Amino acid sequence: MTLTADDVKKIAYLARLGIDQQDVESYTKDLSGMLELMTQMSETNTDGVLPMAHPMDQSQRLRVDEVTEQDNRNNFQAIAPQVEEGLYLVPKVIE
Amino acid sequence: MHNKSIKELASGLRSGEFSSVELTQAFLARIKQHQSLNCFISVTEDLALQAAKLADHRIATGNADLLTGIPIAQKDIFCTQGIKTTCGSKMLDNFIAPYNATVVEKLNDVGAVMLGKLNMDEFAMGSSNETSYYGVVRNPWQTDSVPGGSSGGSAAAIAARLSVCATGTDTGGSIRQPAALCGITGLKPTYGRVSRYGMIAYASSLDQGGPMARSAEDTAILMQAMAGFDPKDSSSVDMPVPDYQAGLGVDLKGLTIGLPKEFFGDGLSGNVAAVIEKAIQEYQKMGAVVKEVSMPNLKLAIPAYYVIAPAECSANLSRFDGVRFGYRCENPQDLTDLYTRSRGEAFGKEVKRRILMGTYALSAGYYDAYYIKAQKIRRLISEDFKKTLAEVDVIMGPVTPSTAFGIGEKMGNPIEMYLSDIYTIAINLAGLPAMSIPAGFAEGKPVGLQVIGNYFTEDRLLNIAHQYQQVTDWHQRSPKGFE
């Protein structure tokens, strides 16, 4: 399976990831190489094999619904690019 | 002082032979002297000296642990409150962590003295430390070679005696491979044994933090302080932690060692194979029994990993969006532009490659063919290990197919770079513990022996490494110029 430059641009958009025009060709080549490597998997029959999502096969631990964290808003916002009155600022989304 | 073990240093601190402040100053001076290795992203000199002073007080008042006053260093993937935590990326070049990782908290609590934050591949994605925004780390054994990755700064700093020991993380070999290439000892614990809280995530079902040091004994002491249940990590395993040091005296008579034929086939360089065979003979002399085994699905570990790890990475790294922390581009036109350019300008090429791969593997229409298929293969690999570890006590083999390669040698060919983790990746897919032990040299460069055990048998692995280090001195060798 090989990808085209347009495929790569589409994937980059899905990931909201800017890539330089001049690098599109090398990403296309690298990703196609990776997909080539993955064709090895299709040669192995996995019918009836349960997908393994996690090494421990454990279920999520539950805890009592109690507040355990203190309010860290000021600390967290101190490292944000742009904040105002406790809010994170981004370019206008709705006119 | 820089060649002493943790136990020797602890006894020197207690007898008054030297203070932790003096010890810390000695290591800080070595870090400065060998800056050209580029092991550290940040050196926290003032904080280290403050911590050393406190440690001296603790030792004087008899309130000390073995690690109290011992200089250590943290891989820059672990959040350190009030200290820059970059994960090797431009994305976090301005990130002052607002809290401590549990591992950092635990090591601070025992009074270990943190010298600084160690260089690493960007977001732990790499096998050579060349993807770091802060530049490549040089291998002290041969400075035009890579130290391995992603915990390259950790391994090189220990080999060069710039820190007594260090933390690392291992998602596909990132503790074991640099440990092997730099001639030190490293342990990748069972998944869930060491808390991941505050350890910046790459591939959450594979990531595991662990100790790195010169000897197995030092590794055991550091592991003792790092391991244990943490309610803040949802995948942390609630099981008692054994006394790792107490487990170091067991003789190896009757130990059965499985040698998977897949570990010794094409692709393994002859001089590495020779060193590994000699190390295994050493175990036979100690009374171990060797058995050839086969794990036919091992060959699928690389393709399965390069679906699963990028898939998890593309999800994990979506948090770096230029909104709440980290890098933000100048003058964003709109929200999409803010996301796209912030991420585009701040992530390096390897990180982008993996985000793209993961996004593709998880996208509609390809999810079953790649992601679910890879998870099924993961199960088959895990079953191979289960079957083999029911027949033998441990599995041994090489850590890497060759010794440290040259800086720049594999950067142009990502697939070739990925293949340098061919013997380590399967262990992460299964979630098993494994170690890298210095086993000798090939053409002047270190070779690592890999020992893989069953779940939660870190104590056994540490003992197996320790017994070998009682009859060999590879782990004590110093690179030239760093004695």
Image (spheres, coloured by chain):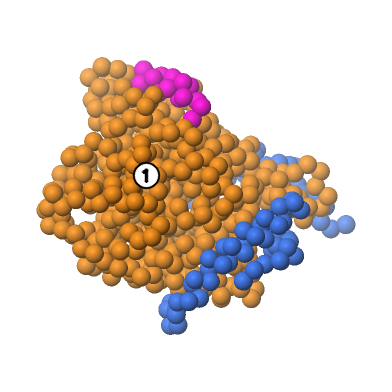
Chain colours: A blue, B orange
Badge 1 element: helix
Q: In x, y percent, where is residue B259?
A: 26, 60
Instruction: Residue at 72% x, 56% y: name it.
Output: A24
Q: Where the C terminus of chain B falls, by quadrant?
A: top left
Instruction: Residue at 80% x, 50% y: name it.
Output: A91
In the displayed structure image, the side of residue A72 where residue B440 appears, left or right: left
Q: Amino acid at mark 1?
A: Ala
Residue at the spot of label 1: B180
Q: In x, y percent, where is residue B472?
A: 21, 39
In the displayed structure image, the side of residue A56 where residue B220 appears, left or right: left
Q: Is residue B287 or residue B94 the one in the foreground? A: B287
Chain for disc number 1: B
Find the magenta span and give its range: B21-37
Is B23 magenta? The answer is yes
Characterize the magenta stretch by its predominant secondary structure: helix
Quarter assignment of residue B69: top left
Residue sitting at the far bottom: A48
Q: Where the N terminus of chain B falls, by quadrant?
A: top left
